[in-house]
Amino acid sequence: MQLKKVKRSRVDKRRRKTLEDNLDAAASLYARDRDGWKCRKCGAQKTRYNLHAHHICKRSRLPTRWAPENLVSLCVSCHQWAEDHPDDAREWAAHLLGERDYDRIVRASMGLARFTVEDLEDMLAEFHNGTPRGVMDG
């Protein structure tokens, strides 16, 4: 039996991309609000333009891309440090979160994830409602 490959329309691809971009923005805002607009590394109070939401596990790892526990607020200089020193940043994140929770996020990030447009819409609604589910919620 041969499976047919289903082509997605340009509209579907655009809708998915728009949802992913909106989710990135919503997750970033959620993390910075949750962290009180302070850098979790140096403790400096920051604003929208000089506080980033850093992904503990790379954002390319889809299962945890929008997981709240995979995001930590870092000022520009601390974010640059994390990008330039990944081994030290991993050690710092494991200490910040605790080894057990850090390991759970890393394991979850290594899984497979395929999100439908409806899944992305649901996740976006959860962020807008202030109730996003994380990888440790279920």
Image (tube, rainbow, N blue to C red):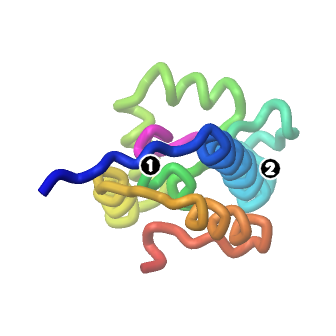
Left or right, 79 with respect to 115, comes to right
- The image quadrant that residue 130 belongs to is bottom right
Q: What residue do we see at 42% from left, 79% from top?
A: 138
**Image: magenta residue range:** 54-61
Name the mark nearer the viewer: 2 or 1: 1
| Residue type at tag 1 | Leu
- Residue drawn at x 44%, y 49% as measured from the top left: 62
Q: Secondary structure at mark 1?
A: helix
Q: Looking at the rendering, which quadrant does residue 31 occupy?
A: bottom right
Label 2: few (<14), some (14–19) or many (≥20) C-alpha neighbours in 10 Å:
many
- Which dot marks residue 37? 2
At a point 71% along the width and 34% down the height, the residue shown is 75
- Rendered location of residue 59, percent (x, y): 50, 40
Tell me how far mark 2 sits from mark 1, CA to CA.
Answer: 25 Å
Instruction: Name the amino acid, label 2.
Output: Trp
Residue 126 pos. (x, y %): 69, 71
Query: Taking 29 as reference, is 42 left or right?
Result: left
Pick the residue in front: 21 or 1. Answer: 1
Is residue 53 at all visible to an observer of this figure?
no
Q: Is residue 57 magenta?
A: yes
The answer to whether 67 appears left or right of 4 in the picture is: right
Disc 1 crowd, CA 10 A, few/some/many (<14, 14-19, 20+): some
Q: Can residue 54 be seen in this snapshot?
A: yes
Residue 62 is labelled as 1
Residue 45 versus residue 50 in the image, above or below: below
- Provide the major secondary structure of the magenta segment: loop
